[in-house]
Amino acid sequence: DPKEWKKQDHYKVLGLSKFRYKATQDQIKIAHRKKVLKHHPDKKAGQGDSNDDAFFKCIQKAMEVLSNAEKRRQFDSVDPYYQQLEEDDLPEAGQIKSFRDFKRAYGPVFEREARFSKTGPVPMLGEEDSTKEEVEGFYDFWYNFDSWRSFEYLDKEINEGSDNRDDKRYTEKKNKTERARRKKEDTARLRGLVDAALALDPRIKRIKAEEKAARAAKKAGRSGAGTPANGSATPTSAAAKAELEKKQKEEAERKAREEEEDKEKKKKEKAAAANAAKKARRAARQQAEGSGTATPAEA
């Protein structure tokens, strides 16, 4: 229904579902031209297909939105395809067995979110052997993410034909309030996503263990210098010192691993509880909203 154009998937109408926000203006123009040639009312006049005239209006509306930078950005902010992905469950703690599992789950998520960044380049998840500086830089960026995402597209339409200024002001005020609410919710959603990734990132455990082992080895090296109070000689040969430091480091790493494993267990339990709460909230929201309106099928 052309009157329900805000509920249609403009990329799908033009046959650009697989490109979406990555589609270039040339691709949009070519796709629009093909659809016009196929569905123009003049071409269908002799076939008595009145519904095709309605679809043609949907095509024109899709082109109007996607060829305008500001309108397209507003639509991309609430693209129904990605909104559905945002609702999908992320893996629970017990499902992340390795960094490969972690990257497979969270890599595409951060790639999608990166399109909203006001600044670039946007750091991606990285690799298993990423340095401490690279990992910390990634999370620092995402915890301070500056997003251009907005929600004007979901504004309630103002009746331009109405002479009632109070009604217009009320609608404008309501729209402004709703945009602010949605922006706040989206910021909280992204923060929760980064929190979940940080809690499950295997590299964090590795980095903390390495830091703790290094501190323990350094401390052991200081305390082992000179002659002990009992008068026994401290190992003086390079080989003896190396062996002592190796044992001290191994012991420190073992203790660090045990402590990190205990912390990781608690984090996983917390993440699982948060995911369960999210499922419950989504189920309640879906029950309240009921069924949605279907968008035009891709021709």
Image (tube, rainbow, N blue to C red):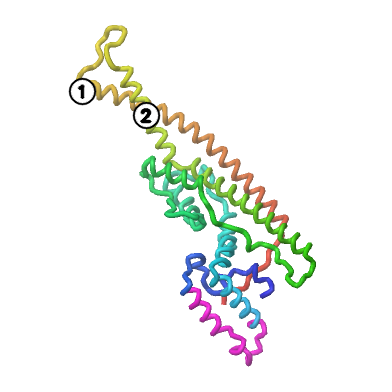
Residue at the bottom extreme of this rendering = 46
Is 24 contained in the magenta span? no
Q: Tag 1's secondary structure?
A: helix
Q: Residue at x 56, y 41 (%)?
A: 271
Is the residue 254 above or below the residue 155 in the image?
Answer: above
Rounded to the nearest whole Å, what is the CA distance between mark 2 and mark 1?
21 Å
Which numbered disc flags the more N-terminal residue, 2 or 1? 2
Range of magenta residues: 27-52
Crowding near the residue tagged with mark 2, few <14, some 14–19, many ≥20 C-alpha atoms within 10 Å = many
Is the residue 291 above or below the residue 269 in the image?
Answer: below
Q: Residue at x 72, y 66 (%)?
A: 158
- Identify residue type, mark 1: Ala
- Identify residue type, mark 2: Ala
Residue 54 sits in which quadrant? bottom right
| Label 1 sits on residue | 238
Residue 131 sits in which quadrant? top left
Q: Residue at x 49, y 58 (%)?
A: 115
In terms of secondary structure, what is the magenta stretch mainly?
Answer: helix
256 displayed left or right of 151: left
Q: Tag 2's secondary structure?
A: helix
Q: Residue 80: x, y in percent? A: 59, 63
Q: Residue 299: x, y in percent? A: 57, 77
Crowding near the residue tagged with mark 1, few <14, some 14–19, many ≥20 C-alpha atoms within 10 Å = few
Query: Residue 266: which numbered mark, if any?
Result: none
Q: Residue at x 68, y 71 (%)?
A: 4
Is the residue 13 above or below the residue 106 in the image?
Answer: below
Residue 257 sits in which quadrant? top left
Q: Residue 94: x, y in percent? A: 51, 42
Q: Residue 217: x, y in percent? A: 34, 25
Query: Residue 213: which numbered mark, if any?
Result: 2
65 displayed left or right of 118: right
Please state, as top left, top right, bottom left or bottom right, where the N terminus lies in the image.
Answer: bottom right
